[in-house]
Structures are given as C-alpha cells and as structure tokens.
Amino acid sequence: MSEPILSIRNLVKTYPNGTQALKDVSFDVKRGEFLVIIGLSGSGKSTLLRCVNRLHHPTSGQIIYRPKEGSESDIAQAEGAEILKIRRKMGMIFQHFNLIPRHSVMDNVLYGALGSTPTVKSVMGLFSDEDEKRALDYLRLVGIEDKAYFRAAQLSGGQQQRVAIARALTQAPDVLLADEPVASLDPATCHVVMDYLRKVNQELGLTIVCNLHFLSLVRQYATRVVALKGGKLVYEGSPSEINDSWFAQIYGEGAKEVHIN
C-alpha cells in the first residue's frame, strides 16, 4: 500500500449555530487512490472536503498533508498565506461547475493557473504560451479540446464539468477534491464525467477524493470507500464489501438503492 498523502485525525467541525457536522472523524487518503466518500445529504461529506481545502476552518483535529517534496504540515492549523498555498495543491470540482459563462472555455481553464501567475499578469489576462499549451493538453485529456474557444455557456452540463476538471488540473494539484461532481447531470452523462475522472486518476496518478450518492457509481469507480452518517465515520473499506447490511447501516433501514446504469 502507498503511503498516505493525507491523514485525517479526530476531525471535528461545529458551526456557530451549534450544529456538529463532523464528529471525531479519522482516516487516511493513500497517494494515488480514488477514494469515494458516501452518505446521506447532511452526513458531513461536503464539510469534510471544505475542511481539507480550508474553505471551512476545522473546530479541532488534524489534517496532515504530506507533499512529495517538502515537509508535512497540518492543514487544520494553517493560517494566512499558508492557506492559499494549500488551496493551490487541493484542486476542487463543485457540483455546479462554477465557470464564468460568458468567458471562453480556454479562459476558464487558464483561470486555474492564477495561483502560480504573477498578480499583474493575471489581472491583465496575460498567460504564458506554456500555460496555454498546458490548458489545451488538459482539455484534450478530458476530450473537449474542440470546444476551447466556445463560450462556456454554450456547453452542456457534462461538458462544463469536464472544463471544470481541466481547470482544476492547471493548478498542478496533489489532490483533486470532487464534491458531488455528477449530481446535476443526467445518468448517461454521469458515466462520461466519471470515466474522465478515472482517466485523470490512472494516467496522471493524481489522488482523487470524491463525494458521491449512488453506490452503483461507487462500485464502478472507487478503489476505496469511506462512509459518513450524522458526521461520524461508519465504514471504511472496499466498495465490493458494502452488502445489504452495510447499506442499511449507512443509509438507514428501509432505504432503497438507486442504480445509475
């Protein structure tokens, strides 16, 4: 087994209104794996990802990050400029794409490189030839290079999500976080987007942590699964071992599995 790139230890997140979204959650993320987090809405999945990239500040616990180069650090304790540095290494894909509709696909992808582009150049939109070549390479990787100079608004939902994947890759992240990346898509398109995420994982060796609802997708794409229920970790292991009994424990008695074919 590869070494952990992330070690989450006793993670707690309590919101100002008293809601405890994460309750003493601990697990490792192995370098190069495709880890999927499952659970009902409100189980803490999105909160967990937002703690990892520090969109949310954890209440307590540790998120130990081990880059290939340099010393390990605790994401949970990062402050100021260190948080921005961490976010550059944690690429993020959201459910609703978060593209700028009136801008071109190429521009949207290039915006992912802003963290490594000098401020004056980024404000003026002056990207290097190398940035543009890399953006086109990533558009090619997700099968959408022919749309590079279309406006983002002209693309279908599945195509826009593939643009979002390419944009995240231009950050040169160590980890790609995907928060319900196919929840807004029709069943056929779900598989297209998930196939490209798997391609990124396998061809680039990029660690992926992905929140999903549907176990049929989990069984097809995940190398390992973590399940949350009410903010607590209730399962960690192989997707193939989630039988009817485990399904009931994770989703509740009487819940029925919905298949995405």
Image (tube, helix red, strand yellow):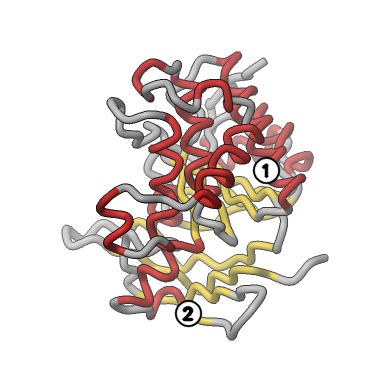
The 10 Å Cα crowd at callout 2, few under 14, some 14 to 19, many 20 or more, is some
Name the element at disc 2: strand
Q: Are marks 1 and 2 in contact (CB under 8 Å)?
A: no
Residue pointed to by mark 1: 200
On the image, the x and y values in percent for residue 80 come to 28, 77
Which amino acid type is shown beneath numbered disc 2? Asp
Left or right of 94 on screen, residue 175? right
Q: Quadrant of the N terminus?
A: bottom right
**Count of numbered labels shown in the rendering:** 2
**Mark 1–mark 2 distance (CA, rounded to whole Å):** 26 Å
- Residue at left 32%, top 57%? 121
Q: Quadrant of the C terminus?
A: top right
241 or 255: nearer the viewer: 241
The 10 Å Cα crowd at callout 1, few under 14, some 14 to 19, many 20 or more, is many
96 or 13: nearer the viewer: 96
Which amino acid type is shown beneath numbered disc 1? Val
Q: Nearer the viewer, mark 1 or mark 2?
A: 1
Residue 49 is marked as none
- N-terminal label among 1 and 2: 2
- Residue at left 30%, top 27%? 101
Query: Please, is residue 227 above or below residue 11 in the view?
Result: above
Name the element at disc 1: helix
On the image, the x and y values in percent for residue 6 come to 59, 68
List the single residue furthest toward the bottom: 71
236 or 136: nearer the viewer: 136
Left or right of 52 on screen, residue 15? left
- Residue at left 55%, top 52%? 130
Residue pointed to by mark 2: 74
On the image, the x and y values in percent for residue 125 come to 32, 47
List the single residue furthest toward the right: 1
On the image, the x and y values in percent for residue 90 come to 49, 59
